[in-house]
Amino acid sequence: MELGPTVWVDIGTKSRGVAGGLPDLAEKRIRALIDTGAGGDCIDDELAKRLGLPITDEGEISGVVGRHCAVVYTARVYVPSLDRLLFQPFTGVKLHQGGQWHRLILGRTFLRQYRLTYDGASGGVELSTD
């Protein structure tokens, strides 16, 4: 699959309660790319602003277009396939503006806790804790 290993996530600033035992976050079924080449985790800057995520830091990052300044947002992200709620920083990047299909990038910071199996032919992704 051309789009790479993708998982669906829910995202928001805080849970609006629990729906059926699961966190009820503002945005549902957001595409997240699992990127083994990314050192950290990123969020689409436009999405972060629309959700009103708090800016908790800023600094210089580097990527395929070189070094540039970026802000860091703090968000809650629920990964249903792992039944895992994350509360952590995400660097704001221009995913949508750059024509990307994903709105979140989960890099090696995220992956350190999991085993990733990716079937390149089908695009199937399996994340596990063992």
Image: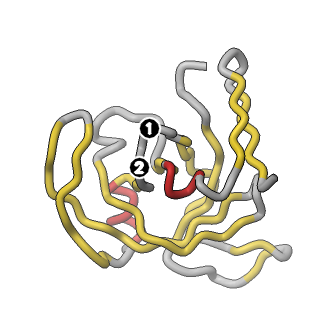
Count of number-bearing discs: 2
Q: Residue at x 73, y 46 (%)?
A: 127
Q: Residue farthest to the bottom?
A: 17
Q: Is residue 69 left or right of residue 118?
A: left
**Colouring method of the image:** secondary structure
Amino acid of disc 2: Gly
Q: Please state the horizontal and vertical placement of residue 61, each as a whole percent of the image.
A: 22, 53
Q: Please state the horizontal and vertical placement of residue 31, each as a whole percent of the image.
A: 56, 45
Depth order, front residue of 129/64: 129
- Where disc 1 sits, the SS reads loop
Q: Residue at x 61, y 71 (%)?
A: 25
Q: Which residue is mark 1?
A: 37
- Where disc 2 sits, the SS reads loop
Q: Is residue 108 above or below residue 51?
A: above
Which part of the image, by quadrant, shows the N terminus?
Answer: top right
Q: Which residue is mark 2?
A: 39
